[in-house]
Image: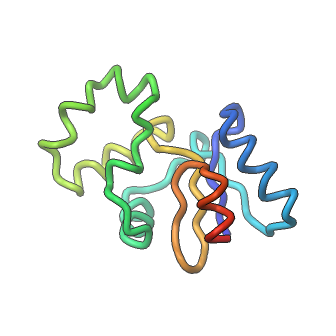
Amino acid sequence: MLFIHYPKCTTCKRAKKWLDERGVDYTECHIVEDNPTAEELKAWHEKSGLPLKRFFNTSGMKYRELGLKDKLKDMSEEEQYALLSTDGMLVKRPLLIYDDGVLVGFKEKEWEEKI
């Protein structure tokens, strides 16, 4: 499993604690230091079955600064992948990539069901 997070994020800290308490084996990736590529994001999006908008950190300052709420609907998926790959702070976190899927954000009940 690949656990992509931002160490200062409280939700990411809760997710990491949840994984550790359950003895889940994972590899950590700091989303800002090692931002996912457009190709990785596309693969994870397709694997997740979720709308692409779910991969955006819509509550983040960067999202608001760029006015993405109004701009995303006019962008192609390829343009959105490229944008997400420019700055880890635009990506919703944590991300957990595992054999059968991808979890975006930390919802304990959802993680219990999938992991």
Is 20 positioned to the left or the right of 82 in the image?
right
Q: Quadrant location of the C terminus? A: bottom right
Work out which residue is located at the far front of the displayed protein and give it. Answer: 109
Identify the residue at image location x=80%, y=67%. 24
Image-based side of 79 in relation to 33, left or right: left
Residue 8 is drawn in which quadrant? Answer: top right
- For image coordinates 54% across by 61% down, the residue present is 103
Residue 89 appears left or right of 8? left
Q: Quadrant of the N terminus?
A: bottom right
Q: Horizontal and vertical percent for residue 93? A: 55, 45
Question: Residue 84, image x and y in percent?
Answer: 38, 45
In the rendered image, residue 104, in percent from the top left (x then y), is placed at 51, 54
Q: Residue at x 32, y 57 (%)?
A: 51
Give the colour scheme shown.
rainbow
Q: Quadrant of residue 43?
A: bottom left
The front one of 84 and 68 is 68
Nearest the viewer among 30 and 50 is 50
Most extreme residue toward the bottom is 99
Q: Quadrant of residue 9?
A: top right
Left or right: residue 4 compared with residue 86: right
Please provide percent x and percent y for residue 108: 66, 53
- Picture residue at 84% right of the left edge, 64% below the top: 22
Q: Nearer the viewer, residue 70 or 65?
A: 70
Vertically, is 89 above or below 107? above
